[in-house]
Image (cartoon, rainbow, N blue to C red):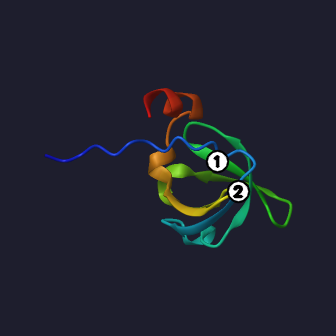
Amino acid sequence: MMKRRKRETRNLLGLKVRVVWSTNRDLMGLGGTVVDETRDTVLLRAEDGHNVRLQKEVCLMEVQTSQHTVILDGRSLVGRFERRLSSG
């Protein structure tokens, strides 16, 4: 029997994020601060000042919190933050 993995419940707004792997190679290495999050995407304010929308499902992201740096599979972030909290 396979154990079901819980969804990620972390709020990403305001956190520093860097794409460490993506099916879109142009996104790899891109970093910035999360300024918005939808069900399927994260909007980053990149280090050069531009906004970039990332599709969660295709990215592996390094996220810096106040205590840790963690690697998150974007697939665990798919869904609205409020719903991830209630179903986590």
At x 58%, y 44%, the residue is: 10
The quadrant holding residue 50 is bottom right
Mark 1: secondary structure: strand
- The image position of residue 76, as x and y in percent, is 45, 47
Name above or below for residue 40 compared with residue 44.
Answer: above
| Contact (Cβ within 8 Å) of mark 1 with mark 2 | no
> Going by the image, does 51 lie left or right of 19?
right
Dot placed on the residue nearer the N-terminal end, 1 or 2: 1
Residue 66's tag is: 2
> Going by the image, does 78 lie left or right of 2?
right
Could you tell me the amino acid type at mark 1?
Answer: Val
Name above or below for residue 75 compared with residue 17.
Answer: above
Quadrant into which the C terminus falls: top left
Residue 42's tag is: 1
Q: Number of marks in the image?
A: 2
State the CA–CA distance, disc 1 to disc 2: 19 Å
Name above or below for residue 13 compared with residue 15.
Answer: above
